[in-house]
C-alpha cells in the first residue's frame, strides 16, 4: 500500500518553537532594573516551568477540574510568591508578569522554518496553551500558523489521546497524514501511539544549557530527526518531492 502524503505539521510550542526560559528571564531583568530589586529570574523561570506538568497531571488524573493554562500559570506564580518575595509587585503587575507566556520569543530558526513549511503543508500549534495565549504569542512573535489548535477546545491537555485525535479530525485528515513535531519525547510517543508521524526537534538549550535535553533513545523511534525547524522543513519537502516523483513514475 502506498504511503499517504503528509498534509499537515503540528507543533508543540513551549521549548520547541519558542524559548520560554530566556523570554521570562529577559522580562524579569527589566523588572529588576525598573524596581531596583534582585529576583533570581533564571531560578524562578525553572521553578515556574517545572510546576507545569504536575498541575496538568492533577487535571488528567481527575484530582482537579480543568482550567486554562493562563489560570494554571497564575496559580503556580502565586505559589512561588513567598519563595521569591514578589510582594513588591502590585496585582496589576503580577497579571502582566503572568502574561509573559503570551509574549514568548521564538528560537532563531522558528519563523523561517515555519514560513518554509507553510508553503507546502498546513501548519498549526498543538500546544497545551489556551487559545488566547497561543494567538497573542503568534501575533507577538510573527508565527505564521494557518490556524490555532488547542486542548481548550475539548477541555483537556496533552498527552491525553483525545487531544491529538481532535487535531487531525478538525483538519479532516488521517493520523498518518499528520506530523507531530516536538522537542519532548513524551509528546511524540503519545502521537505515535495513534498512528501520527513524529519529528524530534533538538533544543539543547531549552533549559538554559545546564540541563541538556537527552533524547537519543527516543530519536531512533521518530520518523524525522531535525536540528531545528528549518532542517525539518527541508526534510519534509524532500520527502514530498520524492513521493511526487514516485507517483509520476507509477
Image (spheres, helix red, strand yellow):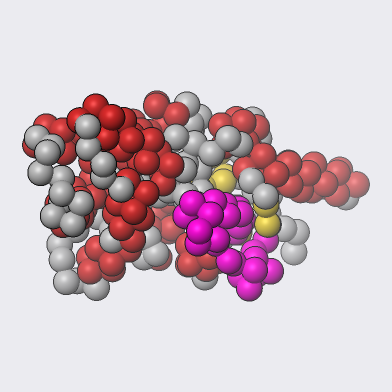
Q: Main secondary structure of the magenta part?
A: loop
Q: Position of residue 37 (x, y in %)?
A: 22, 37
- For the question of whether residue 125 can be seen, the reply is no
Q: Which residues are magenta?
A: 198-224
Residue at the spot x=37%, y=49% of the render?
42
Decide which of 38, 52 is in the foreground and name it.
38
Decide which of 117, 203 is in the foreground and name it.
203
Horizontally, residue 75 falls left or right of residue 27, namely left
- For the question of whether residue 6 can be seen, the reply is yes
Q: Position of residue 13 (x, y in %)?
A: 45, 46
Horizontally, residue 116 falls left or right of residue 158, namely right
Whether residue 205 appears in magenta in the rendering, the answer is yes
Residue at the spot x=61%, y=70% of the render?
218
Image quarter of residue 29: top left
Residue at the spot x=28%, y=61% of the render?
51
Horizontally, residue 213 falls left or right of residue 51, namely right
Amino acid at each position: 500500500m502506498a504511503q499517504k502524503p503528509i498534509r499537515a505539521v503540528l507543533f508543540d510550542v513551549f521549548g520547541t518553537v519558542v524559548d520560554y526560559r530566556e523570554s521570562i528571564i529577559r522580562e524579569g531583568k527589566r523588572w529588576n532594573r525598573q524596581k531596583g530589586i534582585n529576583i533570581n529570574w533564571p531560578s524562578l523561570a525553572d521553578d515556574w516551568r517545572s510546576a507545569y506538568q504536575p498541575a496538568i497531571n492533577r487535571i488528567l488524573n481527575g484530582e482537579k477540574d480543568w482550567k486554562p493554562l493562563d489560570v494554571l500559570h497564575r496559580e503556580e506564580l502565586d505559589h512561588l510568591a513567598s519563595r521569591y518575595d514578589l510582594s513588591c509587585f502590585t496585582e496589576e503587575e503580577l497579571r502582566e508578569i503572568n502574561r509573559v507566556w503570551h509574549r514568548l520569543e521564538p528560537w532563531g530558526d522558528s519563523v523561517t522554518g515555519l514560513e518554509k513549511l507553510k508553503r507546502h503543508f498546513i501548519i498549526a500549534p498543538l500546544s497545551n496553551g489556551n487559545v488566547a495565549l497561543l494567538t497573542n504569542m503568534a501575533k507577538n512573535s510573527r508565527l505564521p500558523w494557518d490556524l490555532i489548535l488547542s486542548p481548550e477546545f475539548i477541555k483537556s491537555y496533552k498527552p491525553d489521546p483525545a487531544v491529538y485525535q481532535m487535531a487531525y479530525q478538525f483538519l479532516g485528515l488521517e493520523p498518518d497524514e499528520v506530523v507531530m513535531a516536538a522537542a519532548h519525547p513524551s509528546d511524540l510517543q503519545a502521537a505515535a501511539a495513534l498512528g501520527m508521524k513524529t519529528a524530534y526537534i533538538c533544543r539543547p538549550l531549552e533549559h538554559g544549557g545546564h540541563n541538556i535535553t537527552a533524547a537519543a533513545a527516543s530519536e531512533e523511534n521518530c520518523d524525522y530527526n531535525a536540528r531545528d525547524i528549518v532542517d525539518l522543513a527541508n526534510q519534509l519537502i524532500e520527502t514530498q518531492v520524492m513521493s511526487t516523483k514516485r507517483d509520476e513514475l507509477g
